Amino acid sequence: MVGATDQTTRVTVRAGSEIVLNGENSDGTRFPLANATWTQTDSSGIVVRLDKRTDKTRAFRVPFVDVLTTLSFELEVRNEDGDTATNEVIVDIIPVSDSDRFLEYFRSLPNQYIAVAVLKQGMTATTAVGFSLT
Amino acid sequence: MNYANRNSSSNTPNQFDVEISNPISHSSSWLAGTTGDWTTFQEAANVYYNPNVCFSIPRLGLDDINIFFDDIDDGSGIAEHQRDTVEHFVDLTLDVAGGSCTDSTGAAIDCQDAVTLLVLKSNGELVDVLGGSSADVVYVMVV
């Protein structure tokens, strides 16, 4: 089927940006398309929410990550004769580093924040570790 | 605050800071045997052994500014339309007190180096990962 050719597309994005997964070029050739399904297929442990824009299009906000992280998605289209075809999209996320300066509109400032004291990944407290957050 | 008036020297505007909040502090501890076992920062923020503190960034109103302005410029003050950009500085510090820690290889390390700070919006969106245990977070607001 046109637009779903068992091929893989790979893109690189920055954390925080918006991605649109577009399957609009899909076509059922001899029969009309019955449906199109986008599925996240990676095992990164990060699950993104795919918002429906059109029957063949989904969008999501790229999550913030600590290290280079890869997400993958599969589009499966099916025509009314039951034929299927798939495309894979791989999204490499580049972490945003040193981004402690933010531009906000004053009127819409989200005023509530949460500071979390975190024991770094893989670190172990062998005796109780006290702390204060100020 | 940067502003210029007839007493300002060329290219050297008057400047002062406005403190609009009292410091808050929260103390807790990680129990012996606790290991930082997480893969994403959102996950780190959600695990029970990483306590969190909710805070608000106070909005800077004209009254907060004009209290100072009145004192230093004979009460002339400023109006809403004269304010363009506001920078909010939030100082966050995580101080470790006692305890002992090991890294992922089992080697002993300074516990101050075993911790870090995350800042999230109340909706869970990650605002920033502070690389160490203290930092200034700067919010620039376009009025």
Image: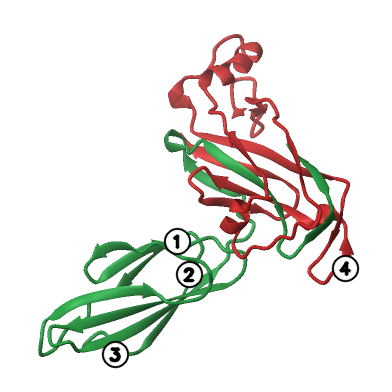
Chain colours: A green, B red
Q: Quadrant of residue B104?
A: bottom right
**Residues tagged by mark 3 and mark 4 found on one chain of the structure:** no
What label sits on residue B107 in the rendered view? 4
- What x and y, as percent, mark residue A68? 58, 72
On what subunit does the disc labeled 3 rest? A
Q: Amino acid at mark 3?
A: Thr
- What x and y, as percent, mark residue A5? 29, 90
Quadrant where the C terminus of chain A sits is top right
Q: Nearer the viewer, mark 3 or mark 4?
A: 4
Q: Earlier in the sequence, mark 3 or mark 1?
A: 3
On what subunit does the disc labeled 2 rest? A
Q: Amino acid at mark 1?
A: Ser
Q: Is residue B47 left or right of residue B132?
A: left
Residue drawn at (12%, 83%), measured in percent from left and top? A80
Callout 1: 10 Å neighbours few (<14), some, many (20+)? few
Element marked by disc 1:
loop
Q: Nearer the viewer, mark 4 or mark 2?
A: 4
Element marked by disc 3:
loop
Disc 3 from disc 4: Cα separation:
51 Å
**Residues tagged by mark 2 and mark 1 found on one chain of the structure:** yes
* Residue, disc 3: A5
* Residue, disc 1: A17
Callout 3: 10 Å neighbours few (<14), some, many (20+)? few
Q: Amino acid at mark 4?
A: Ala
- What x and y, as percent, mark residue B106? 85, 69
In the image, B51 versus B16, the foreground residue is B51
